[in-house]
């Protein structure tokens, strides 16, 4: 499963994944994303900043993730373990529902870790919706540690947990 930097033509494909993920999550009572976030403008900004990565199968985007150093201001009040060095932040990791449970999310996490190790990052951080047990289990299986405290985003009933992992420079 090759993870590669997205091209402009991938923006529409990533939005299609997002749309299908929203419908799938809502059908399970998971209200993590909605028709406001993530928007096409957010995904286009991910592309324009060079931080959008995709996995393709038979030519179509089936999974995507944004990797950058942008931390929401809410992160500032949390007791992160790894405070020195650069931090890579994972945003908007998504896998088309038809391709879920095939290791694509795990591949994106592995790619993020390889990317972080290869670009001098000391740690990886992200937030995850507390109402999405499948995602939480995935992150914990991959060694991400939950920090104490939560953050809240607009239009969300439940808080977001925050996770981090030290980067293995030997990866």
Image (cartoon, helix red, strand yellow):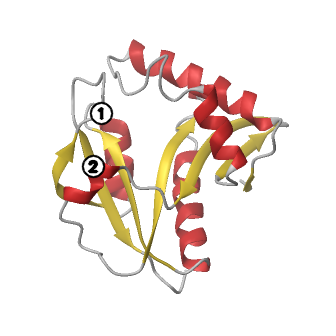
Q: Is residue 53 left or right of residue 37?
A: right
Can residue 64 be seen here? yes
Residue found 67% across the figure and 33% down from its top: 14
In this figure, which residue is indicated by the disc labeled 1?
153
Report the quarter where the C terminus lies: bottom right
- Is 155 located above or below residue 121 in the figure? above
Q: Residues within 10 Å of mark 1 (few under 14, many from 20)?
A: few
How far from the left and from the top, in percent, is residue 79? 18, 64
Residue 108 image point, x, y percent: 57, 54
Mark seen at residue 81: none
In the figure, residue 132 lies in which quadrant?
top left
Task: Point out which mark residue 74 bears.
Answer: 2
Give me the residue at 37% from left, 27% from top.
Answer: 32
Q: Secondary structure under badge 2?
A: helix
Describe residue 39's horizontal placement relative to residue 28 as left or right. Answer: right
Counting from the top left corner in percent of width and height, residue 117 is at 55, 78
User: How far is disc 2 from disc 1 in space, using C-alphas?
Assistant: 9 Å
The answer to the question of whether label 2 and label 1 lie on touching residues, with beta carbons closer than 8 A, is yes
The residue nearer to you, when weighing 98 against 157, is 157
Residue sticking out furthest to the left: 148
């Amino acid at each position: 499963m090759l993870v590669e930097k997205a091209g402009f033509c991938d923006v529409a494909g990533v939005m299609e994944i997002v749309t299908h993920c929203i419908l799938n999550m809502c059908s399970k009572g998971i209200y993590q994303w909605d028709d406001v976030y993530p928007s096409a403008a957010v995904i286009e900004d991910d592309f324009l900043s060079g931080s959008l990565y995709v996995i393709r199968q038979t030519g179509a985007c089936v999974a995507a993730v944004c990797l950058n150093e942008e931390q929401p201001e809410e992160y500032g009040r949390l007791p992160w373990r790894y405070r020195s060095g650069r931090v890579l932040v994972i945003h908007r990791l998504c896998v088309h529902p038809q391709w879920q449970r095939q290791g694509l999310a795990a591949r994106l996490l592995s790619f993020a870790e390889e990317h972080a190790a290869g670009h001098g990052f000391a740690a990886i951080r992200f937030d995850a919706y507390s109402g999405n047990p499948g995602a939480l289990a995935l992150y914990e299986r991959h060694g991400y540690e939950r920090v104490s405290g939560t953050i809240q985003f607009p239009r969300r009933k439940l808080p977001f947990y925050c996770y981090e992992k030290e980067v293995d420079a030997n990866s």
